[in-house]
Image (cartoon, rainbow, N blue to C red):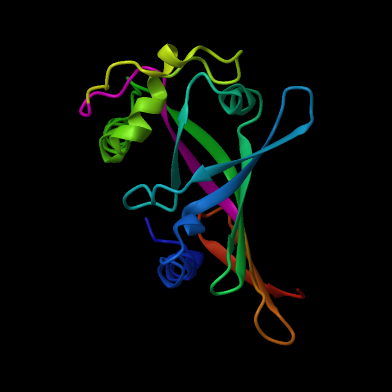
Amino acid sequence: MLLAPWRSLLTGALHRNRSLPYARYVQLATVRPNGRPANRTLVFRGFLDGTNQLQFVTDDRSQKVSEIGTSPWGEVCWYFPQTREQFRIAGSLVLVRSGDPDPTRQQAHAAAWQNLSDAARQQFTWPHPGQGRGDAAAFQAQKPDEMHPLSQFCLLLLEPDRVDHLQLRGDPQNRSLYLKTQDLNWSIQTVNP
């Protein structure tokens, strides 16, 4: 698979903003079953090898998982303050759980778990997200095995089909749309900011 033309721009923005720890944070928008929007912040975990798919992790018990089950569409918005540019990346969301039948996705699922810090893995042992607050002891579960993901651990993939890149430096500013075509290539259109 050929890498999309916007990939090098995003990789460059990540590199130039690497001194800012929050430069890996994106906002993911989904649609709730009642049609209302939902938005939350996730940590970008890199690209799935050899693809344009963005990787994130989530808890199978979280609200976003039920939203993705209702509508597989989502969009991330990513702002890089150092370079003053924004990427809005839209496409379909894929949840990868333990036992996924696709060997490549299953391998990526295991690798994502193994690449987490101990503290991040520990969060998957906590009580059910969004439920009434548990007592302090409920957050002190035994440290999970770093090689074997817990059942509630999911890898979340975003398969982009539209990327809107806005560069706020310049007068006028620069904006480009990247659209995935039916033959899985990408068209590029320069548009007004």
Residue 159 in the magenta stretch? The answer is yes
Does 97 sit left or right of 13 as displayed? left
What residue is shown at x 20% (from left), y 28% (from top)?
Answer: 147
Quarter of the image with the N terminus in it: bottom left
What residue is shown at x 48% (from left), y 21% (from top)?
Answer: 60
Q: Quadrant of residue 143?
A: top left
Does 188 sit left or right of 123 as displayed? right
Does 117 sit left or right of 137 as displayed? left
Quarter of the image with the C terminus in it: bottom right
Magenta residues, start to end: 146-162
* Image coordinates for residue 95, horizontal then vertical, percent: 47, 30
Residue 48 in the magenta stretch? The answer is no
For the residue pair 50 and 13, the one nearer the viewer reads as: 13
For the residue pair 107 and 103, the one nearer the viewer reads as: 107
Location of residue 158 with respect to 188 vertically, above or below: above
Residue at the extreme bottom of the image, as rendered? 171
For the residue pair 1 and 65, the one nearer the viewer reads as: 65
Location of residue 84 with respect to 157 vertically, above or below: below
* Image coordinates for residue 123, horizontal then vertical, percent: 41, 27
What residue is shown at x 54% (from left), y 20% (from top)?
Answer: 129
* Image coordinates for residue 146, horizontal then vertical, percent: 22, 29
Residue at the extreme front of the image, as rendered? 136
What residue is shown at x 79% (from left), y 28% (from top)?
Answer: 35
Total count of labels: 0
* Image coordinates for residue 16, horizontal then vertical, percent: 44, 73
Location of residue 152 with respect to 35 vertically, above or below: above
